[in-house]
Amino acid sequence: MHTLKHSFIILLSVSLISIILSGCTEEKTDEAMIQLQIEHLQAAIETHDRGKFMDVIDEQYRDQLDNNQRSLQRMLMGFFLRYKDISVYVSATTINVQSIRADAQSQVVLTGGKNIIPENARHYQVHSCWKKVSGEWLLSCLEWE
């Protein structure tokens, strides 16, 4: 179960990075705004900045493990303590925006380790849900397999 929690955080990182790599962020389209939020999340993961990461999480966040915003924050803290180095590799991302909701699908590979050499690597198919709140896109749900 402990490894599953860490895999979840890695998966979340990969999902978000995949959306970043899916297109241009120069336009102010909803897709571009979601990509900027993903960049924000990516930077927070890479610098182990839990507060910056949580700024992009919706207060009603849920995932397939039934984590909410608070339990996600605790898991993230544990993940950062366990893994000094985190890398995310993303491909085949698609974003579908419908009004104030959006879905993103990505193929993601996450690696993490205490040193330079990764001790954990996993491949995931990730589905992330986004909700527009007061003009800002927030991550509201996450599923992976």
Image (cartoon, helix red, strand yellow):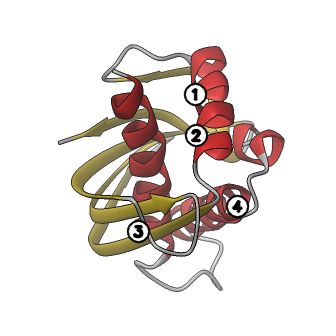
Q: Position of residue 44 (x, y in %)?
A: 72, 56
Residue drawn at the location 30% of the way across and 23% of the way down: 64
Viewer-side residue, 68 vs 46: 46
Is 142 placed above or below 42 here? above
Of callouts 3 and 1, which one flags the residue occurring earlier in the amino acid sequence? 3
Q: Amino acid at mark 1?
A: Met
Q: Residue beneath label 1, please?
A: 75
- Viewed as shown, does residue 11 lie left or right of 71? left
Observer able to see residue 25: yes
For disc 3, the marked residue is 18
Spatial separation of the CA atoms under disc 3 and disc 1: 21 Å
Relative height, residue 19 to residue 5 (above, below): below
Q: Secondary structure at mark 1?
A: helix
Tell me the crowding category of disc 3: few under 14, some 14 to 19, or many 20 or more residues within 10 angstroms, Cα based.
many
Spatial distance from mark 1 to mark 4, Cα to Cα? 19 Å
Amino acid type for the residue under numbered disc 4: His
Query: Callout 4: 10 Å neighbours few (<14), some, many (20+)?
Result: some
Quadrant in the picture for residue 77: top right
- Please determine whether, in this image, residue 115 is positioned above or below residue 21: above
* Secondary structure of the residue carrying numbered label 2: helix
Rounded to the nearest angstrom, the CA distance separating label 2 from label 4 is 18 Å
Quarter holding the C terminus?
top left
